[in-house]
Image (cartoon, grey):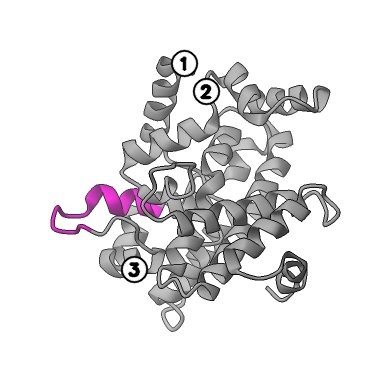
Amino acid sequence: MYNEQRLQQWVEHLSQSELPVMKQTARDLTALHEDERRLTTRTLSEIICRDPIMVVKLLRHFHQRKSSSQTVEIIEVEQALRMLGVEPFYRDVAIHPLIEDLLGKSNPAALPPILRIIRRSQRAAEYAYDWAVRLHDLHFESVSHAALLHGSAEILAWCFAPKAMLKIREMQHNDSTLRSRDAQQQVLGFPLTVLQSALAKAWSVPELMMSMEDSAAENQLRMRNVVLAVNLARHSANGWDDAALPDDYRDIGQLLRMPPEHVPAMLKKT
């Protein structure tokens, strides 16, 4: 059983904190704001969607301020920008602090893991988007966002508790059989999936929940897409000879109704 008190302390701390974004994200958003010819909700959303925490900041702001008459729960970044307005976004959603400034001097060893998680999240979002299109899912953007946000709690943990996350990594390095969930529970008092669910509820951001394991989920196919995309991105990050990939190919083949031996060739085209 996880430590409910420690979990609540984390939720309260993160809720009161400005969430950090990548330096490149801040640079690109600033440059776009200064270029009126290029500044549209589409170009703005393209930059935001490269950074999982920037997406969280935008959607948290949107969901916490939407009117009671707005009943749509899962929403796309560009749709949120259209409803908020470009200038109100720049005024109300901070593009600071920067992850690199937060960790650069005090805990530089935490930066490479964060960059790997972000790159992995970007790849998962690309896979989920492609498969949603193949499945004729009209909510392909939302599915992509859910895959992108799957590692959000892990990124935030590296930003706000780098020493604890380094300890978890060391524990797993010393014991290859130790599962991430168990190591996180030992060090943090709770698994990061539990933190992500708690943040989703506290911030009213259902996109954070879409990729969580939930047997009662209304749309199993959509959730399956997200989970498989996240798994493939995680395993392929270890190299395309990772032992878990054949099982991924089998599951992806079932999702897309294609022979598993055709999946690797399909992935090379994405």
Residue holding disc 3: 79
Q: Earlier in the sequence, mark 2 or mark 1?
A: 1
Give the x, y percent position of residue 79: 34, 68
**As drawn, 150 above or below 154:** below
Residue holding disc 1: 3
- The answer to whether 32 appears left or right of 165 in the picture is left
Query: Which circle marks residue 190 in the picture?
Result: 2
Between 164 and 211, the one nearer to me in the picture: 211
Measure the alpha-carbon separation of dots 2 and 1.
Answer: 6 Å
Measure the alpha-carbon separation of dots 1 and 3.
Answer: 37 Å
How dense is the environment of label 3, judged by Cα within 10 Å: few (below 14), some, or many (20 and up)?
few
Q: Nearer the viewer, mark 1 or mark 3?
A: 1
Label 3: which secondary element: helix
Query: Which circle marks residue 147 in the picture?
Result: none
Judge whether residue 63 is colored magenta.
Answer: yes
Q: Earlier in the sequence, mark 1 or mark 3?
A: 1
Judge whether residue 232 is colored magenta.
Answer: no
Give the x, y percent position of residue 51: 54, 56
Segment tinted magenta in the rendering: 58-71
Q: Earlier in the sequence, mark 2 or mark 3?
A: 3
Q: Report which quarter residue 233 is drawn in.
A: bottom right
Q: Residue furthest bottom?
A: 37
**As drawn, 217 above or below 182:** below
Which amino acid, by three-letter code, is at mark 3? Gln
Which amino acid, by three-letter code, is at mark 2? Phe
Quarter of the image with the C terminus in it: bottom right
